[in-house]
Structures are given as C-alpha cells and as structure tokens.
Image (cartoon, rainbow, N blue to C red):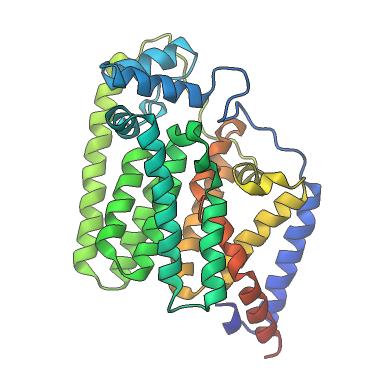
Amino acid sequence: MLAALTRIQALAVIALIVALALATLTIGPAQTGEAISGDGRYSDVQLYHDIGNAVAGGEDYYHAATRLQRAHGFPTSPFVTVRLPTLAWIEAAFGWRATHGMLCALLAAAAVAWFAMLRPLVGAGERVAAMLLVLAGGAMVASPGLSVSHELWAGVLVALAMALRVKGLTVPAFIAAALALAIRELALPFVLLAGLWAWRSGRRAELAAWALLLAAYAIALFLHRGAVEPLSLPDDALSQGWGGLRGPGAVLQDIADVTVLHLFPAPPSYLAVLLCLTGFLGAPVPLARFALPWLATIALLLAVFARPVNFYWAILTVPTVMVGLAFLPRAARDLAKALRR
C-alpha cells in the first residue's frame, strides 16, 4: 500500500505520523467514567453479573435488566441502553465458568485464524508476531469477571470474523460476525464493511447473506425496543446522549486503557497505540481493507460520540489493534521504498 506512494506522498505521510507522535506528548491524563472493572461503586460489570444471575434464577431478562438498571441509577431510555439479551442468555444457560471458557477459546481461535490467514501473505516471523499480538491484545479475557463485557465478546468475535473472511472462509466468518452483532450492536460497521466488499467483489450470494442478516437484525432491534419501552418508567434515568466530542486524543487514551499498553506510563502508551494503528498501513492489502476501516470507525466513535464514561467502546478494537505492531517494520520499509522512487 505505502510502497505505491510517490516520493511527495510518502513525505506527507511521514510528516503526518511525526506530527501525531509529537501531539501525543500534549495529551493529558485520561478522564474516564466509572471503570468497567469497578472501583468500589456499583459498576457496569456488577450490573451485568447481577442481570445474568437473575436470568439464571428464572427471571425474565427484560424485567431483570430494567429493574436492576433502575435500582442503581442506570438509564433505561432510549431502549439501546438496555443491552440485547444474547449474552445474558448464554451466561444463564452455561454458567459463569463455561461462559468464561468459551470467551477464552474464541480468543485462542482468533489467534490461530490470524496465523492461518497470514500464511500466504507474509513471512513466518510476522505470522507468529501477529498471533502473539492477538493474544496480547485480548489479554483482558483472562479476567473471569470481564466475561460479562458485551464489547469484549464483540471485539473478539469481529477479530475472528475478520481473519476468516480474509482467508476466504465466508460461512464461518458470517457466523462469527452475526454472533458479534447479536451481542453488541456496535459490531454493525464490520457487517456493513463485509457487505461492501462482497458487493465490490461481485459475490452476489455473500452479499445477499449479509443483507439478510441486516434485515433480521433490524427486526430483532424492533422487537427489543418493543420489550424495553413498556418496562421503562417516566422517572427512570435517561441517557446523557452520545456527543462527547473528545477528539483524537481520546482514541489513544481509551485504547491504551483497555489493552496491556496501559502498563506503560503516559504518554509513551499513547505513542504505542499510534504505532499500532500506523502499522496497519503496512498490512497486506486483503487484510488492510478490512482492518483499517474497522479501526477507523471505532476511532471515529470514540473521538466524536463517546463520553468519558463510554471509554469501554475501545474494547471493540481488541484483540485486533495490537497486531498492527507486527506490520510496522513492513510499513517503514514501504515508506523507505517510496522515498527512493
């Protein structure tokens, strides 16, 4: 991708990367809302644990969710503030230990899928690095308590679906993406992206499948709304909306906070996130055309719409985002090649 640039274009890309790297030095400490892992208050994690336990005990999901969200000051309106019931049903059906085990197994499957997908595209070293970085990027699945995170499930499933789709395994990719969408609606951009490339590639059957998935999902959301709104009361808390307008710095902060990069101090951790994103400019084209738009969409959501309390949307980028480090040397070589043109 970068190797095809002219010398002037390569210089412009380098200047932009350097400017962004210098800008990371000016980013202040992150100001997140209530931590997803809890901090002594009643957190999102505790809420979803309690909802799962209530459903396992026989209570209807929608009654349990609206009751608990109301009791602890969480909004019930608009209807999307109440999550889809898919994950709670999984937790109730299989139990906490099995649910956590399934999430860990999905991460392992994603790592293997990325290794296999990259086999004809890059060398052995990059394949191994990518596989290890998938595991590192999704390290938070090791915490059993975070298996209630809808964003974590969606992020892992999208990473798996992306690898399978690039590999050409359309049916397994469709299943993984559909499950991600059933758990968290923020997986929708990947489904739209897959449909776009099916259309661009002339794959009519695949395009029809993605279109049917979107139609079925629209019906599911309509039914979800019909189940939530009658149970919402006039004095329930309302969402403060999604218009954070926090800017590009929030993207680097939020992704750093939800990956192992938070172990580094700021601003070096923010620079590391920038390098992860930059690395995908050197990724093989079949992968880059999925990974770059997906990560760019999540970055847009974080920069424009997410409030500080919504920082956990960045979990949608795991375990994909850190794989960019595997392609960073390739991106540097491609830029050097373009500069010599």
**x then y, percent, for residue 204:** 20, 68
User: At which x and y percent is residue 303?
Assistant: 60, 45
Q: Residue at point 46% right, 42% down? A: 152
Number of disc labels? 0
Q: Is residue 24 left or right of residue 65?
A: right
| Apparent side of residue 94 relative to residue 18 in the rendered image (left or right) | left
On screen, residue 71 above or below 97 = above
Q: Indicate left or right for 146 with 5 as reference.
A: left
- Above/below status of 168 relative to 321: below
Image x and y of residue 49, in percent = 43, 24
Question: In the image shown, does 144 or 138 lie closer to the viewer?
Answer: 144
Residue 224 % position (x, y): 27, 29
Quadrant the C terminus occupies: bottom right
Q: Is residue 249 visible?
A: no
Vertical arrangement, residue 282 with respect to residue 252, above or below: below
Residue 222 horizontal side relative to residue 322, left or right: left
As displayed, is residue 286 above or below residue 340? above
Report which quarter residue 40 is drawn in: top right
| Residue 96 visible (yes or no) | yes
Look at the image and tell me in which quarter the N terminus lies: bottom right
| Quarter location, residue 326 | bottom right
Residue drawn at x 54%, y 22% as measured from the top left: 43
333 and 293: which one is in front?
333
